[in-house]
Amino acid sequence: MNKITVRLMEEVALEVSMRRMAVFLAVLIVAPALASAEQNWPGEPVDNHLYMSWAALTQEVNQWADDNPDIVQLSSIGQSFLGKDLWMVVLSDWSMETKANGSAKEIVYIDGGHHGNEYLGTALAWLTAKWYINEWNAQNEEAIKVLQNTELHILIMLNPDGNDFDTRHNQNLTTTANPFASEPVPTGIDLNRNYDHYWDDCSPSDPFAPGTGPFSEPETKANSHYMNTVVQDADLYVTMHTGVWIMLYPWGKWPEQPPDWELFHGIREEVNAGISDIPIQNANQGLYPNCGTSRDYGYGVMGFPTFTFETDDDQFLPGTFEDVNERLGEELDVMRYLIDNIWYWRARLVVDSLTIDDGKVSFTIENQGRASTQNATLQYVDGDKVLWESDNFIANASSSVSVSSGGFDEDGGEWRLHYQKRAVNSSQWVNESVDRSPEVSTLFSESVETLLWILQAGAIPIFVVAFAFWWSREEKPFDLDDEVPLEAELVE
Ligand SMILES: [Zn+2]
């Protein structure tokens, strides 16, 4: 190390200690004012919970469930490496199994605290749950509407051991579980590199401890099990972290835009236009290449539209002059937007018109959702048996498409749409029955048309006769020889 480097480091150290002193003084000066000032939302609870421990969380979520049985369901979906329960809070209006119209509620999946020392990410997950509970009880219309139509599944703290020890990784300290060669001391496993999507496939550059294999850790195993068995229909997955102020959409593995780039870009435009300036980018370019993350797993394997919400670049209360509540409040606004509009985060196909003419089925599809879909078909089915199927078609987000397919010669079935919710291969397939019955051009309607034509054609001679009769009765200005017409004589 040369002199200049040492000097620079001393300067940096000096600067850091001066900054700390300034912060300390500022806190001393500001603290009494804060204590007496009227609290703005989220206010006191967040101040207390930026460093929320697992024990405090356990007490609190149990209290939520006890106080709000109408909307809160609490369960443990597994245990951490050291045996702490992983609490799942599920919020919805439990007086109704479905939406008022009988269709299934939308499903939102949220997790926080993959990294034990990323407190604001955990706080945002906590805050999201708390906002809906508070506002439901305050009879806020938005919260009521969301809980009547949506299930919010929120796992606030995935890595309670890391939270306890104030470390990024979990507490699996067995050396064999940590193949990170350049790290001789066991560091635990980075849970957000332990998912089964191109696991440990960013080497040699990924400087993290991904574990001995995909889902080698109890925390990630429990999380993925829940994704696959309870919230597999989710149309939004947000995983909350701290580090930089950014929202990351897939992929972490590749620099290319994901198949559903249109959906992610549309969300970015709306968020940036009216809610927050937070940057929104694909993870590989917005952050750095990363593999085996829950975000890439959520999108690439589960087919969810997924965001990593990096809540902040400055999570430590004493190190900031900006109001933490305001910052978290802005991030909560983004969450509320994503949750309020979840209905749009997939393709939503509706049949606008449907006609059958001589075995050819012509139809127009409107996609009311903000995601595109490929390989969609209109099917004519009898139960699960497909009697007839249209050619594959693509329905782009928020637009219409017209399709014609021949070979229809069926009877006794029903119409349905068969398509994927989003463009990514992993996205869920849905079968949706079609309410609209086709306008059929059959023999019957053709004969009606023919009859109409005959009647119209027949009207012409009738009109001619009537005109002739009228003409015969009139004074004829051009009838120079003034003869009485023959027809008139006949009539008289
Ligand atoms: Zn993180």
Image: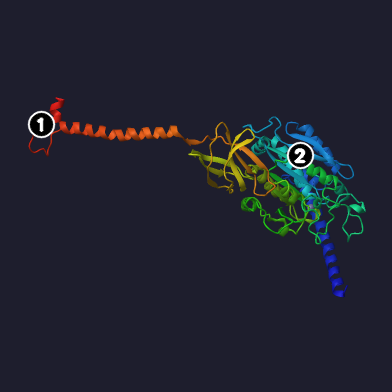
In the picture of the structure, the residue carrying the numbered disc 2 is 229
Report the side of 75 relative to 254 (left or right). Answer: right
- Residue at the location (79% across, 44% down)? 223
- Residue at the location (69% across, 36% down)? 136
| The one of 284 and 325 positioned closer to us in this rendering | 284
Image height check: is 35 above or below 277? above
- Residue at the location (82% across, 44% down)? 221
Confirm whether residue 424 shows in the render.
yes
**Residue type beneath disc 1:** Val
Image height check: is 20 above or below 172? below
Confirm whether residue 44 shows in the render.
no
Which element carries disc 2, helix, strand or loop? helix
Q: Position of residue 176 (x, y in %)?
A: 91, 53
**Quadrant that contains the N terminus:** bottom right
Find residue 71 and report its image quarter.
top right
Distance in Å between CA atoms under marks 2 and 1: 97 Å
**Quadrant that contains the C terminus:** top left
What is the basis of the colouring in this image?
rainbow
User: Are the two marked residues, 2 and 1, in contact with CB atoms closer than 8 angstroms?
Assistant: no
Which element carries disc 1, helix, strand or loop? loop
Tell me if mark 1 has few (under 14), some (14-19) or many (20+) residues whose alpha carbon lies within 10 angstroms of its own.
few
Report the side of 183 relative to 143 (left or right). Answer: right
In the picture of the structure, the residue carrying the numbered disc 1 is 484
